[in-house]
Amino acid sequence: MKIATQKMVVKLGLSVCLGAVLSACAPMMLGGFAVGTMVAVDRRTTGTQVEDEGIELRSANRIRDSLGERGHINVTSYNRQVLLTGEVPNAQDKQLIEQVAGKVENVRSIVNEVAVMEITSLNQRASDTLVTGKIKASLVDTKDLFATSFKIVTERGTVYMMGRVTQREANRATDIARGVDGVKKVVRLVEIISEEELQSLSTK
């Protein structure tokens, strides 16, 4: 797929997501065309993308069953690495949700960034969603990055970056994210690949 076409597709997807009050941008929301397109430009294999979606769904359901209404938890999986964010009332619950997620099928590793504190307000979550949308839009506007190479999560102003990217791409995306209003900190959880690997992926 040509670079210009990829960026046009990503911009279309982002415009739909941002138009929906910057709600979570899941490919399924965009219909069959977008699902196929997002799979095509993602650097994970199709099978891994499906696994990640399953991991997120199963982990969220099991955490909800175990935690009840005691906390606010987000589960994000990229290449079977699970990022846990949100808030719980005590350290025991933080450990509990990590144990629950760790038992989910196909999980490779877990990064537990859940805070022990009061649950954030809806205004804070809306602000985080807005920050994520701005970062994605900024990545789309660059000429040397693909927004679909990154999965962006924002929690209380801290931005988490996941993806399979080169060191150059990771540094560039970090600089872009740090320049967005509302960003307090950027945490990189990316898998670094070589420029040669990137070239190989680009020609497939």
Image: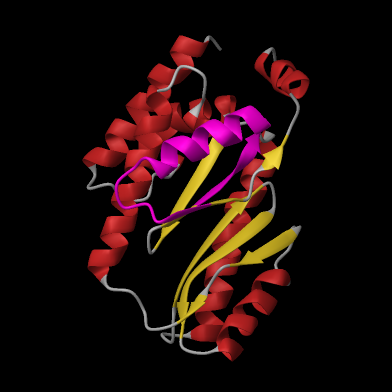
Left or right, 54 with reference to 7: right
Is 89 within the magenta?
A: no
Q: Return the x and y of residue 124 as percentages of the image width and height.
A: 28, 65
Q: Residue 77, can we see it? A: yes
Left or right, 115 with reference to 29: right
Q: Quadrant of residue 97?
A: bottom right
Up/down of 170 relative to 152, above or below: above
Q: Residue at x 59, y 65 (%)?
A: 58
Is 183 within the magenta?
A: yes
Q: Quadrant of residue 150?
A: top right
Which of the pair 36/179 is nearer the observer?
179
Q: Residue at x 63, y 50 (%)?
A: 189
Q: Return the x and y of residue 131 as percentages of the image width and height.
A: 33, 48
Left or right, 174 with reference to 165: left
Q: How is the image coloured?
A: secondary structure
Count of picture labels: 0
* Quarter containing the N terminus: top right
Left or right, 138 with reference to 161: left
Q: Return the x and y of residue 122 as percentages of the image width and height.
A: 25, 68
Up/down of 179 relative to 113, above or below: above
Q: Return the x and y of residue 109 as percentages of the image width and height.
A: 74, 60
Which of the pair 190/100 is nearer the observer?
190
Which residues, given as a range, are shown in magenta?
160-186
Q: Residue at x 46, y 17 (%)?
A: 143
Q: Quadrant of residue 4?
A: top left
Q: Residue at x 76, y 57 (%)?
A: 108
Q: Residue 107, can we see it? A: no
* Quarter containing the C terminus: top right
